[in-house]
Image (cartoon, rainbow, N blue to C red):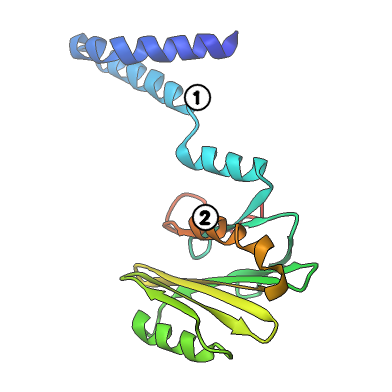
Amino acid sequence: MVRKLVALFALLATLYLPGVRAFARSGDALRALEKAEESIKATVPTEADQSNAALKADGYATYVNGRYGYEIAYPRDIFTPQGESDAGDGQRFLGADGATLTVYGGYNALNTPLAEEYAEAQKSMVGGASYKVMNKTWFVVSGLEGADIRYRKTMDAGDRRFTFELVYPAAEKEQYDPIIPRILKSFQAFSPALPGAFRSKPPR
């Protein structure tokens, strides 16, 4: 019942608040309207809230690094977080089958060109990169390393650079193929200047 009333109030406010604001003349009236609008907005879930809720319901948790401003989702039934690094720049997650998910980032203090790191990433692939693609602000390289598949994405966000590496048994390819797109989609940067962003949050 309460939700229905809130929805009805939100609808009426959407229809009538602009008109009321046009005729309101006193500062008190305007402030009252602004508070009402803020209350309405507070009842509506943001896109980020909805995304996190969907991930959680689907068996994913989100690691948020508030120090450098990035986040990534991982399947909770496969990976166990090992705790944030001493430097506070990332974290490693371990799977029971020997798979690892490593994520880290920070400021590109040396101004290393992304293309240069892209080339180095390909060279670091023991068996060579069987898949590689580069964009203006990110690159992906992947390839076989013995009995494992290694998948890496690095992206730039202003003067910051973030990377995640997923290493998993090639024999478990069918299990991990659906996971990679989900991790890719969730791997995002945000401004570390946002309120509370300097406090690293634990995995959800």
Q: Are marks 1 and 2 in contact (CB under 8 Å)?
A: no
Q: Is residue 184 above or below residue 104?
A: above
Q: What element carries label 1?
A: loop
Q: In which quarter of the image is residue 34?
A: top left
Q: Tell me where residue 38 appears, x and y as whole percent.
A: 41, 25
**Residue found at x 60% / y 8%:** 1
Q: Toward the viewer: 154 or 22?
A: 154
Q: Tell me where residue 119 appears, x and y as whole percent.
A: 41, 87
Q: Which amino acid does label 2 sit on?
A: Ser
Q: In this view, does 12 lie above or below 48?
A: above
Q: Tell me where residue 143 appears, x and y as whole percent.
A: 55, 80
Identify the residue position indicated by label 1 in the image: 43
Q: In which quarter of the image is residue 9?
A: top left
Q: Is residue 97 above or below residue 64?
A: below
Q: Quadrant of residue 15?
A: top left
Q: Is residue 111 visible?
A: no
Q: What residue type is labelled 1?
A: Thr
Q: How far apart are marks 1 and 2 (CA)?
A: 25 Å
Identify the residue position indicated by label 2 in the image: 186
- The nearer-to-camera label among 1 and 2 is 2
Badge 1: residue crowd in 10 Å (few <14, some 14–19, many ≥20):
few
Using residue 27 as the reference point, say whether residue 108 is left or right of it.
Answer: right
Q: Is mark 2 on a helix, strand or loop?
A: helix
